[in-house]
Image (cartoon, rainbow, N blue to C red):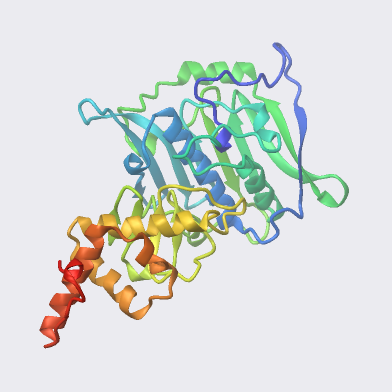
Amino acid sequence: MDDKMQRNESPVPLHDSGNTLPTHQPVCITSSSVPTWTENDAFRELYQNWKDAILQKYDVSLSEFRPSRTETDREIRIVVPVINRADGWQAAYAGFISFGKATGVVEITNFQSSLDMRCLDIGYSTTKNDACLAGYYGEGLKLAALVFCRGGSHIKLCSNSSHWNFALKGRGNRNLYCNITPASRDKVQRLRDKATRQRGAISPSDLTANIWEDVSVIIKRDGPPGKFRQEEFEGWVRTTIDINPPPELIRTLAGDLILDGAYSGSLYLKGLRLRSTDDLRMAYNLAHGVSSQDRSEFLNHPLQLRLITQIWAGAIAQGNKIALNAYCTLLKEHSGCTDVKDAEFMISEPTAKAVWRYLKDEASLLGRFYVPSDSSDLV
């Protein structure tokens, strides 16, 4: 899957015509890579690849990407509907993520996609030059596979009528390999003959992946400590704010302002949580920029400050009084925090005027008054 999911480009053949022998492919990543990563980090990478592939294939903007979640006694399912912009009706589904409560199996599927063999190469990426996508370095799939394998889980991809199984092998099980085994042609043909799926016309719970035309990542854990629990899966899902958006969220062109106190100090980039909060008092989802390769921080600090300033400006311009009150509180009581750092150099004129009006009204209520130093201070 990865940020190497193909849209218009024909995939590199997995095997010659008529050849059904498996391929044993080294991935050139060792077990000591990203030593601090957990399964949360690994899922975040797979989620990012799933999301980027949908944004690319269906030409969906970040603001239009709205997964929906349903839950039954049997499973949790997250789907992304494709909306026809002409009439606003749902045209199809772009993919799904599911968690089986009884089995503990997680499946991440992109419909109408294929996997390129080059995705196993170091640094190969199809999203590096797309500013709307979170993928950049081209290592997400491989590092996610490593982390799950290192933790004793089994991760498999189904695509291009083949099964891609990752495993640590070699001396001391230090090296990551991918075994690619073509599915039986007779079995694939039987499945094709049976396929009656109409993705735009059935319920999300009925969606299934087809190995010949979709890409699926399947993760399960059979050994100690047992199958994945629902609490673990919920923790994975919290690495993004796309699926369960905070209730107090204000969207702007520069990104989202998150006023929910439960998220205080969190920083997201294009919906994905970064590790470093960099002395933030509030929470933000930045719509532009690039993170470090390990997703620990936002790389361009001056851009981060500008985006945060623009997010506040956008929220205040919408007339949100809660946002204005929060911003003025930061300026008065936490002027050294990252949220308002260098605000005096970057604040827009409309925002500055809104802040002054707020401060004057507040002073009036307290029986105080403000004396302008010259006519330019009048608002």
Residue placed at 59% from the left, 51% from the top? Answer: 42
Q: Residue at x 73, y 33 (%)?
A: 179
> Quick one: which residue is furthest to the bottom in this view?
367
Answer left or right for 282 relative to 17. left
Viewer-side residue, 283 vs 172: 283
What residue do we see at 42% from left, 68% from top?
341
In the visual, does 328 lie left or right of 60? Answer: left
Residue positioned 53% across, 34% down in the render: 129
Q: Quadrant of residue 334?
A: bottom left
User: Where, by quadrant of the figure, is residue 353 drawn?
Assistant: bottom left
Residue 150 in percent (x, y) is at 71, 53
Q: Quadrant of the C terminus?
A: bottom left
Residue 245 in view here: no
Image quadrant where residue 140 sits: top right
Residue closest to the eye, 34 or 223: 34
- Image height of 201 relative to 276, above or below: above
Vertical arrangement, residue 67 with respect to residue 191, above or below? below
Farthest residue in the top direction? Answer: 17
**Quadrant of the image containing the N terminus:** top right
Left or right of 128: which side holds 72? left
Give the percent coordinates (x, y) of residue 298: 52, 56
Q: Nearer the viewer, residue 23 or 342?
A: 342
For the question of whether residue 36 can be seen, the reply is yes
374, above or below 299, in the image:
below
